[in-house]
Amino acid sequence: MHSLKLIQSEVCPYAQRTHMCLLEKSLDFDRVEVDLANKPAWFEAISPYGKVPVLEDGEIRIHESSVINEYLDEVYPHPPLMPARAAGRAVARIWIDFDNARFVPAFYRVLLEQDSRKQQQIVDQLVGHLVYMEEAGFTKHWKGPYWFDGDISLVDLTLYPHFERMAVLQTYRNISIPPDCHKLMEWCAAMKERPSARLTAHDDDYHIESYRHYADGTASGTTARDMRQ
Ligand SMILES: N[C@@H](CCC(=O)N[C@@H](CS)C(=O)NCC(=O)O)C(=O)O
């Protein structure tokens, strides 16, 4: 048994963020799968929001994928996954916050919304977010392949899991990355090949099935409830 334990669910993009982070750092860890449709009592007792992922590191227990990943980067600093300079770290945190506060909520809301007029408003918002990422996320002289050029960072690990699930948006709401978002597409293709992404990946059919209950409005879990608010 290792001192690091990732309490996760295979379907969960947030848990995938942390799984990728652990792999990027070549850490030894155990994984415990939680059935979110039938949460065990021990899980309810340790997860304050009833959500995965939760990380245990010996006696320490942390929830919220972005917080967990920054913790891992501080405690296990090699290889570093945040820029060396404070200004660079601030930029990284802005993109992580953008993903958590804007892009990902729109991703869920566009699926959950069943009224076609309101749905269209969220489609426009989501496409606007994609264009904003293309225009503001990468510098003019971006060399790729990752968000901060050659250095993979927590920004990549935070954003990528929902991009792996783009087929969900395409299938249910006909949304894809706009064709002139070349850098975003190049970034996405590079991330797909990253070993930490390949080792944690599921195929399009798996994701499309997993999100069916969001798209038809029947999702009733904690995430659906929070995203509807
Ligand atoms: N903000 C949280 C979100 C985690 C989250 O929403 N996890 C989902 C699975 S993808 C969950 O556990 N949901 C519980 C439920 O729907 O009942 C994080 O970044 O860790």
Image (tube, rainbow, N blue to C red):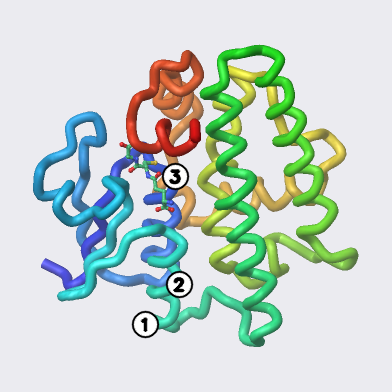
* Identity of the residue drawn at 10% across and 49% down: 42
Is the residue indicated by label 1 positioned so its CB lies within 8 Å of ligand 1? Answer: no
Which residue is denoted by mark 1 in the rendering?
75
Which residue is denoted by mark 3 in the rendering?
13
Give the structural element (helix, strand or loop) at label 2: helix
Q: Is residue 81 left or right of residue 131?
A: left
The answer to the question of whether label 2 and label 3 lie on touching residues, with beta carbons closer than 8 A, is: no
Distance (Cα) linking label 1 and label 3 = 23 Å
The kind of residue on which mark 3 rests is Pro
The answer to the question of whether label 1 and label 3 lie on touching residues, with beta carbons closer than 8 A, is: no
Give the structural element (helix, strand or loop) at label 1: helix
Is the residue indicated by label 3 positioned so its CB lies within 8 Å of ligand 1? Answer: yes
Picture quadrant of residue 169: top right
Q: Nearer the viewer, residue 194 or 94?
A: 94
The kind of residue on which mark 1 rests is Val
Residue 143 location (% of width, % of height) = 80, 65
Distance (Cα) linking label 2 and label 3 = 17 Å
Which residue is denoted by mark 2 in the rendering?
70
* Identity of the residue drawn at 39% across and 58% down: 64
Give the structural element (helix, strand or loop) at label 3: helix
Image position of 190 with respect to 76: above or below: above
The disc, 1 or 3, on the residue closer to the chain's N-terminal end is: 3
Distance (Cα) linking label 2 and label 1 = 9 Å
Ligand 1's image quarter is top left
At label 1, counting other C-alpha atoms closer than 10 Å, the crowd grade (few under 14, some 14-19, many 20 or more) is few
At label 3, counting other C-alpha atoms closer than 10 Å, the crowd grade (few under 14, some 14-19, many 20 or more) is many
At label 2, counting other C-alpha atoms closer than 10 Å, the crowd grade (few under 14, some 14-19, many 20 or more) is some
The kind of residue on which mark 2 rests is Glu
